Image: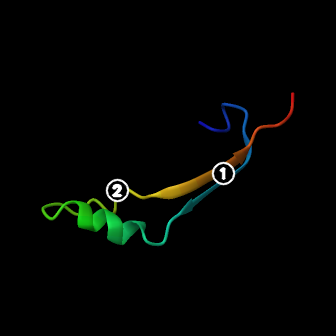
C-alpha cells in the first residue's frame, strides 16, 4: 500500500514489547500471533 502511494525506503519494525502488551489486553483470547504493534517509517520523494 505504501509503495502504491509513492513512498520509498519503507521500514516496518515490530516493537519488542508488543506481544506481551497485546496478550495482556484480553484474558480470554491470545491474538498476539495475529496483531502486532509496529513503527512504520517511509519517505515520500520530492515531486
Q: Is residue 18 left or right of residue 31?
A: right
Q: Residue at x 34, y 62 (%)?
A: 33
- Residue 6: give x, y in percent of width and height: 73, 33
Mark 2 is surrounded, within 10 Å at the Cα level, by few (under 14), some (14 to 19) or many (20 or more) other residues, namely: few
Residue placed furthest toward the right = 47
Q: Secondary structure at mark 1?
A: strand
Q: Is residue 27 left or right of residue 35?
A: left
Residue under pointer 1: 41
- Residue 7: give x, y in percent of width and height: 72, 38
Q: Residue at x 66, y 51 (%)?
A: 41
Residue under pointer 2: 34
| Position above or below: 17 against 26 | below
| Position above or below: 4 against 40 | above
Front-most of residues 1 and 21 = 21
Q: Residue at x 37, y 68 (%)?
A: 19
Position of the N terminus, as image quadrant, is top right
Q: Secondary structure at mark 2?
A: loop
Q: Is residue 18 left or right of residue 8?
A: left
Task: From the image, state whether disc 1 or disc 2 is nearer to you.
Answer: 1
Position of the C terminus, as image quadrant, is top right
Residue placed furthest toward the left = 28
Amino acid at each position: 500500500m505504501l509503495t502504491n502511494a509513492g513512498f520509498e525506503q519503507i521500514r516496518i519494525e515490530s516493537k519488542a514489547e508488543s506481544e506481551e502488551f497485546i496478550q495482556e489486553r484480553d484474558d480470554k483470547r491470545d491474538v498476539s500471533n495475529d496483531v502486532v504493534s509496529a513503527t512504520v517509517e517511509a519517505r515520500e520523494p520530492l515531486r
